[in-house]
Amino acid sequence: MPSASCSPCVPAQRRLDVLATKPGEQSGLTLLEAVIAMALFFVAVLAFAGVAVTASKGAAASKRLTMATTLAQDKLEQVRSAGYDPAATPETTEAYGTIPGFDVYQRIVRMETGRPVPGLQTATVTVWWSDDRHSVTVATILAP
């Protein structure tokens, strides 16, 4: 004889009776429970959205910093390849909108002869962006 706990052996009507509620009992969620569950869900969604926005802003700032650093290093390589020049212009500025393809950046090159010691020259490149709120600076020392 089959076991009584065997679900396929129990007639379909009896299985439905087990699932049905008895008179006076309630099943499901009350309106208050549903509203609370929805509120918790929306709080979690809003928290996730805030994290996503912060991460997006961080990625954009990182991209701008990387581009500014690349622009500064490229210019510093140009200065290095030109070599030591005691007659070099002390300061040159590539204003916003004048660096092709990089309108939101400004680049300033400063040449200081006799620094850190006589006979040497310090070249400093500073790249600004976001209306001069952020900058990156790189420097090198040139010898004759």
Image: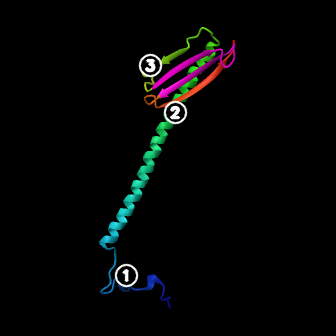
In the displayed structure image, the side of residue 63 where residue 46 appears, left or right: left
Q: Mark 2 — residue? A: 65
Callout 3 crowding tier (Cα within 10 Å): few <14, some 14–19, many ≥20: some
Which residues fall within the magenta stretch? Answer: 105-128
Amino acid type, callout 2: Leu
Foreground disc of the pair 1, 2: 2
In the displayed structure image, the side of residue 86 where residue 34 appears, left or right: left
Percent x, y of residue 33: 34, 71
Report the residue at 61% width, 16% height from top: 112
Report the residue at 31% width, 71% height from top: 32
Give the secondary structure at mark 3: loop
Callout 2 crowding tier (Cα within 10 Å): few <14, some 14–19, many ≥20: some
Q: Mark 3 — residue? A: 98
Percent x, y of residue 37: 37, 66
Q: How far apart are marks 1 and 3 (CA)?
A: 76 Å
Amino acid type, callout 1: Leu
Q: Which of 22 and 35 is in front in this view?
A: 35
**If you read the primary sequence from the N terminus, does the residue marked by circle 1 or circle 3 appear first?**
1
Q: Kindly indicate the quadrant of the structure image that contains residue 137.
A: top right
Q: Mark 1 — residue? A: 19
Q: Which of 139 and 59 is in front in this view?
A: 139
Q: Nearer the viewer, residue 123 or 80?
A: 123
